Image (cartoon, helix red, strand yellow):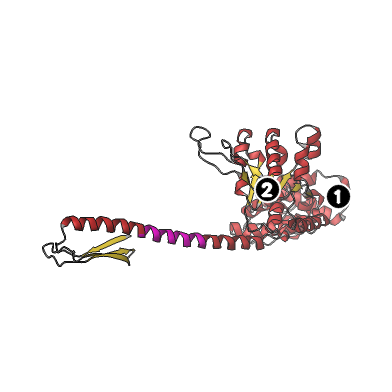
Amino acid sequence: MLSELVTSANFNDSTFTLWQVITVCDQVAGGFYFGKKIIGEPYSREDEDLLRTTISSAAHVLENLQLYSELEHARERLAAENLTLRQQVRKEMPSYEIIGASIAMQKVHENIENFAKSDAAVLIRGETGTGKELVARAIHYQSPRADSPFVAINCTAIPESLVESEFFGIESGAATGVKQRIGYFEQAHGGTLFIDEIGDMPLSSQAKVLRTLQEHTVRRVGSLKEIHVDVRIVAATHQDLKNEIKAGNFREDLYYRIGVLEIHIPPLRQRHSDIAVLATHFLSEKEKKIGRVLQGFHPDALKLLQRYDWPGNVRELENEIERIVTLADDGESIDEGHLSPHIMDEYSSGSDETLFLENIRDAVDRLEKRMILKALAECKGNKSQVARILGLSRLGLQKKMKRLNLAEKGMQ
């Protein structure tokens, strides 16, 4: 980074002038020039050493200034890139990414749009796996705070002993070997703090969070200094907080502080009309992720997906589609045989009332398909054995499988 150029000196010549050029990063940055001494004496080796020392110090100062300038330019460039990325994420996070055309989900979309305009605290209620964080992000990225941080924290992931330091930070030296840590409130300054599963937060921590929301300040563990924070709170829970208040597990004053606005996300079992849309979306997504191309869903497979209750909600459906894409072969159409056994089992144990909702031909086809698939699994694809078990000829089994659109790949 640093180079120096010095003239050779004839120290016996009293007319000699001493000079040195400073170059930083191969660029001339300056120089020193000593003319002839007034008293006519020649320069000495000590004079040269003094000049070298002076030049070395000056060169390092100039080099540091140049590095500082480069760092400032880099910082400005990164800040601009960061803003661009935030704006891009903002465009990519509209509420239509929260998939669902049911009346219940249309209400969720409407609430997201309206709540984004406000700066009031939002409480999102819904079962595990319904997409509460996705809703929180949509609110943030459609709000005036979109260019500021979105910080998410799940209360169930923090041990009770660490809640205070995680939320409010800790000063260096607060305990032996402890380094300074910036808490989640400070990290989210100017933006949104998403507190997931707030109903599981310990009572002792609830009081401290309430104080921060009231005072808009935090005090790091081990510090007496109050730090101002400007944060919008979006909280979420799968619990009924009013029941938790009655049970003494949640503070009523905190509930009214975080629940100024509320959104309820219905479970997937209450919006079966959204399942086909979600399944198709996840199929396209997982095909790109895994590098596989399938031929979509057979109508019977979609019907089974729609009749399943999905206790794990959207997250469970996404996992099911990823499993299907992982195990299926390229070019296959997804039929009942690709679905997890527990989905088939739930249908087979369904009530008689469900069976009467479809015509007899469909019911017979469905029963025959299930019997053939089960026999094929037990016989490891040996069609001769399957035909014998089911009381069919091999040719009759082949015709029936073709009519029922059952793949024969890998069968004997």
Can I make out residue 199 in this image? yes
- Residue 65 part of the magenta segment: yes
Q: Pick the quarter of the image with the N terminus.
A: bottom left
As measured in the structure, the alpha-carbon distance from the residue carrying label 1 to the one carrying label 2 is: 44 Å
Is there CB contact under 8 Å for labels 1 and 2? no
- Considering depth in this image, is 333 or 265 the residue closer to the camera? 265
**Where are the magenta residues, as a range?**
62-76
Res 48 → quadrant: bottom left
Q: How many residues crowd mark 1 within 10 Å: few (<14), some (14–19), many (20+)?
A: some
Given this view, does label 1 or label 2 mark the residue nearer the observer?
Answer: 2
Q: Is 190 a magenta residue?
A: no
Which residue: 26% across, 55% down? 53
Tag shown at residue 93: none
Q: As drawn, is 333 to the left or to the right of 50?
A: right
Q: Residue furthest left?
A: 12
Query: Are there few (<14), some (14-19), or many (20+) residues within 10 Å of tag 2?
Result: many
Residue located beneath label 1 in the image: 355
Q: Is residue 124 above or below residue 74?
A: above
User: Residue 166: percent from the left, percent from the top?
Assistant: 60, 40
Residue 380 lies left or right of residue 108; in this view the side is left
Quickly name the residue at label 2.
194
Main SS of the magenta part reads helix
| Residue 253 picture location, percent across and down | 77, 39
- How many badges with numbers are in the image? 2
Identity of the amino acid at label 2?
Phe
Question: In the structure shown, which secondary structural element does the residue marked by tag 2 occupy?
Answer: strand
**Between 67 and 52, the one nearer to me in the picture:** 52
> Judging from the image, what secondary structure is the residue with disc 1 in?
helix
Establish if 324 lies above or below 9: above
| Residue 292 in view of the camera | no
For marks 1 and 2, the one nearer the N-term is: 2
- Specify the amino acid type for callout 1: Leu
